[in-house]
Image: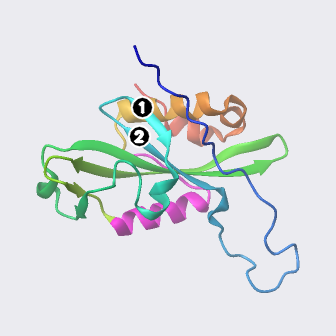
């Protein structure tokens, strides 16, 4: 009998202001320091943080050639790449931006489907504290919400009601 090891990788929690308040170059620039990619494996009912996804090198993406044609990966496994941005308010850190991008991976064919421009745009929206999970099915939303709660209950409680409503299932 094998036990699954508990992953020790956590969300990137807010670092210090890189501009140190000087107001010069770099002010208003968005930082990737507070963004973490979460891969939702729909079939397995699991979600995990996979920092490799920042550079399209997550476990799900490795060894696969991606195209923008769904037929190339027909019969593949569905995944969601979820960009989670952490911020801090008076009560403490919270899930500020959460956006989900679709991926399909067919290991046998070594082909996958994803829209890279969509992935980039949704990462940007997450960094801008937006919630975009409307394309996710109920099963995927449930997996993600349970993962976020289990990862840090306090951050989930401090998150805006918009996130809780967006991840609500029927």
Q: 29 or 105, which is in the foreground?
A: 105
Q: Is residue 56 magenta?
A: no
Q: Label 2 near label 1: C-beta < 8 Å?
A: yes
Q: Secondary structure at mark 1?
A: strand
* Quarter of the rendering occupied by the N terminus: top left
Q: Is residue 131 magenta?
A: yes
Q: 108 or 45, which is in the foreground?
A: 108
Magenta segment main secondary structure: helix
In the picture provided, is 16 more to the left or to the right than 145? right
Residue beneath the point at 65% across and 70% down:
30
Residue beneath the point at 72% across and 32% down:
154
The label on residue 33 is none
Q: Give the crowd class for mark 1: few <14, some 14-19, many >=20 residues within 10 Å.
A: some
* Quarter of the rendering occupied by the C terminus: top left
Q: Secondary structure at mark 2?
A: strand
In the picture provided, is 163 more to the left or to the right than 137? right
Q: Residue furthest front?
A: 1
Residue 135: tell me if it is visible. no
The label on residue 46 is 1
Residue beneath the point at 25% across and 57% down:
64
To which quarter of the image does residue 44 belong? top left
Q: Residue furthest top?
A: 1
Residue beneath the point at 38% across and 64% down:
118
Q: Is residue 30 above or below residue 14?
A: below
Find the magenta span and give its range.
Answer: 116-134
Residue 89 image offset from top left, x and y in percent: 80, 48
Q: CA distance from mark 1 to mark 2?
A: 6 Å
Q: 160 or 15, which is in the foreground?
A: 15
In the picture provided, is 139 more to the left or to the right than 51? left
Q: Give the crowd class for mark 2: few <14, some 14-19, many >=20 residues within 10 Å.
A: many
**Residue beneath disc 2:** 40
**For marks 1 and 2 on the same chain, the one whose residue lies earlier in the sequence:** 2
């Amino acid at each position: 009998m094998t036990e699954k090891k508990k992953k020790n990788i956590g969300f990137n929690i807010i670092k210090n202001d890189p501009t140190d308040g000087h107001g010069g170059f770099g002010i208003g620039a968005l930082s990737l320091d507070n963004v973490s990619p979460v891969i939702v494996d729909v079939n397995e009912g699991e979600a995990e943080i996979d920092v490799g996804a920042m550079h399209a090198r997550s476990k799900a993406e490795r060894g696969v050639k991606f195209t923008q044609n769904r037929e190339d990966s027909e019969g593949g496994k569905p995944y969601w790449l979820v960009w989670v941005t952490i911020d801090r308010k008076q009560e403490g850190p919270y899930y500020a931006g959460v956006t989900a991008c679709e991926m399909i991976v067919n290991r046998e064919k070594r082909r996958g489907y994803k829209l890279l421009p969509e992935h980039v745009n949704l990462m940007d929206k997450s960094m801008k504290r937006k919630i975009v999970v409307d394309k996710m099915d109920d099963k995927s939303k449930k997996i993600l919400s349970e993962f976020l709660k289990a990862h840090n209950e306090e951050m989930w409680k401090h998150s805006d009601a918009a996130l809780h409503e967006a991840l609500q299932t029927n």
